[in-house]
Amino acid sequence: MKKYKMEFKSINILRVILIILLFVIINILKYFMYMIEIKYPSVTAFADDPVFRKIVEAFLFITVIICIGYVVIYLPLCCSRCLFCVSDDQISVHKGLFIKSSQYMKIKSILFVNMVTVPFLSAVGFNFLVFNGYGGRILFTFISQKDSDEILAFVKEKNSQLKADRGDKL
């Protein structure tokens, strides 16, 4: 049985993208609040109240802390606990931080495999393998290009052997 882990380079890129997205959303919200104050001064007269401003700032601060906690703590912990296993007769995914889950699929029940790569980011681990089988689907996320090619070749070889053993036409 061979075990694979998520590529941490891709998780770091995802963390940077999420932090940039957070600051873009915050600035867009500030801009819209400013435009509403300019366009409708009578409706937003209560916005000059210092208590209201402190509530808005506290809400914004709590939102930023939650998002940064997600990016800095939760996302890396979830990714470090994700494990992809490939054996001679089945593939499996074990994941979860608080709620652990496992998915299993027999190699002989795999109908087809989709390999999804993101242009310019496949070298850092933005590769996904989707195993579609009878009644289910298993997703291997954020694996390196080398690992995804290796898994794909192994599954293809095992399926060819199983079909040859059964006497199916290729």
Image (spheres, rainbow, N blue to C red):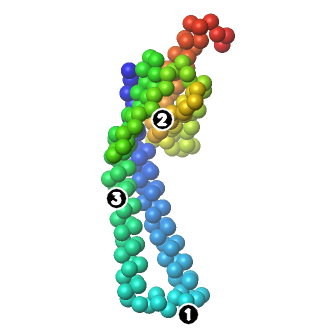
* SS at circle 1: loop
Q: CA separation, marks 2 and 1?
A: 54 Å
Q: Residue at x 41, y 90 (%)?
A: 49
**Lateral position of residue 28 relative to residue 78, left or right:** right
* SS at circle 3: helix
In the picture, the quarter occupied by the C terminus is top right
Q: Residue at x 34, y 41 (%)?
A: 80
**Quick check: can you spot residue 153?**
no
Q: Earlier in the sequence, mark 1 or mark 3?
A: 1
In the picture, the quarter occupied by the N terminus is top left
In the picture, the disc for residue 69 is: 3
Three-letter code for the amino acid on which mark 2 is drawn? Phe
Q: Earlier in the sequence, mark 2 or mark 1?
A: 1
Q: Earlier in the sequence, mark 2 or mark 3?
A: 3
Whether label 2 touches label 1, CB < 8 Å: no
In the picture, the disc for residue 111 is: none
Q: Nearer the viewer, mark 1 or mark 3?
A: 1
- The percent position of residue 132, horizontal first and vertical second, equals 57, 30
Residue 71 falls in image quadrant: bottom left
**Lateral position of residue 17 relative to residue 50, left or right:** right
Three-letter code for the amino acid on which mark 3 is drawn? Gly
In the picture, the disc for residue 42 is: 1
- The percent position of residue 103, horizontal first and vertical second, equals 45, 32
In the picture, the disc for residue 140 is: 2
Q: Alpha-carbon neighbours of circle 1 within 10 Å: few (<14), some, or many (≥20)?
A: few
